[in-house]
């Protein structure tokens, strides 16, 4: 009866006061001369590469096949430096209610393993979670640096979990926990249990439209969340 619980990061586990948006905006300006503050792009639930491409398209910046891939990689290197700077600034950085208790409960559970499923590139994910001493709970994960398409990430995370934990997980034994419609959509695409939490910018109504298997206002009721993961 083993289960794999895959957690999103931003607005599901933690709130970082826009540090990621500020860092990616500064990196875009330096590498592509694009002013992200003038672009209306929702970042919730999207992968970092997807956000970058959407911003460049909105800025009507013509692609440069010979140089853009190199600049994109350079931008992510710069983004990591800037994200580290932003996270060191004073800000309203918080762990959402119930998260420490839930992670300790799952970490001690004999039949639940944990991992990440996030649009953050891996190094960005580590920086954000290290800020709250949460990285230690997640030995495996799938990241925006693995694929720009979030639909690919459940399969990547599950494969890594099977290799790390030495067990197999059928899709219905995997739970994806997140605050955006894309968390629900990628769970359903893979055949996993979708556990939505209304702690982000996505409205409850928008989450309900995706028909998640479970919808919580927060993850504070850790026993109810555990029950959803184990079902």
Image: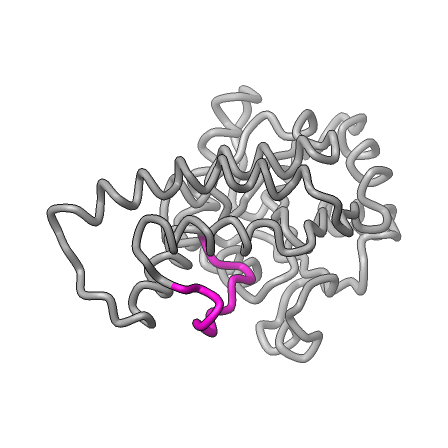
Residue appearing at x 31%, y 63% in the figure: 56
Which x, y percent locates residue 18? Answer: 63, 56
Residue 30 falls left or right of residue 7:
left
Residue 151 or 162: which is nearer the viewer?
151
Which x, y percent locates residue 147? Answer: 36, 46
Residue 29 falls left or right of residue 124:
left
Which x, y percent locates residue 220? Answer: 87, 52
Residue appearing at x 60%, y 78% in the figure: 209
From this viewpoint, which residue is outermost toward the left?
Answer: 66
Q: How is the image coloured?
A: one colour
Q: Quadrant of the N terminus?
A: top right
Magenta stretch in the rendered image: 35-47
Q: Is residue 72 magenta?
A: no
Q: Is residue 167 above or below residue 142?
A: above
Q: Is residue 45 magenta?
A: yes
* Count of numbered circles on the image: 0
Which x, y percent locates residue 19? Answer: 61, 50
Residue 88 falls left or right of residue 79:
right
Residue 142 or 84: which is nearer the viewer?
84
Q: Is residue 165 above or below residue 114?
A: above
Residue appearing at x 57%, y 22% in the figure: 165
Residue 95 or 163: which is nearer the viewer?
95
> Quarter of the image holding residue 117?
top right
Residue 187 falls left or right of residue 111:
left
Main secondary structure along the magenta-highlighted residues: loop
């Amino acid at each position: 009866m083993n289960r794999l619980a895959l957690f999103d990061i931003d607005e599901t586990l933690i709130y970082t006061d826009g540090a990621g948006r500020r860092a990616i905006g500064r990196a875009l300006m330096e590498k592509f001369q694009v002013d992200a503050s003038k672009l209306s792009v929702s970042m919730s639930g999207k992968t970092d590469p997807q956000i970058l491409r959407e911003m460049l398209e909105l800025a009507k910046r013509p692609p440069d096949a010979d140089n853009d891939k190199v600049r994109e990689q350079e931008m992510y290197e710069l983004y990591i430096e800037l994200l580290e700077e932003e996270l060191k600034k004073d800000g309203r950085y918080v762990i959402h209610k119930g998260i420490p208790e839930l992670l300790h409960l799952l970490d001690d559970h004999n039949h639940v393993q944990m991992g990440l499923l996030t649009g953050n590139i891996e190094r960005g994910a580590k920086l954000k979670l290290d800020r709250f001493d949460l990285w230690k709970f997640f030995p495996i994960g799938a990241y925006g640096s693995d694929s720009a398409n979030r639909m690919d990430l459940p399969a990547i995370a599950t494969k890594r979990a099977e290799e790390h934990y030495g067990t197999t997980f059928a899709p219905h034994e995997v739970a994806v926990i997140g605050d955006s419609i894309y968390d629900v959509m990628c769970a359903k695409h893979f055949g996993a249990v979708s556990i939505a939490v209304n702690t982000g910018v996505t409205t409850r109504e928008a989450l309900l439209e995706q028909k998640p298997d479970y919808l919580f206002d927060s993850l504070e009721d850790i026993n109810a969340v555990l029950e959803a993961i184990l079902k």
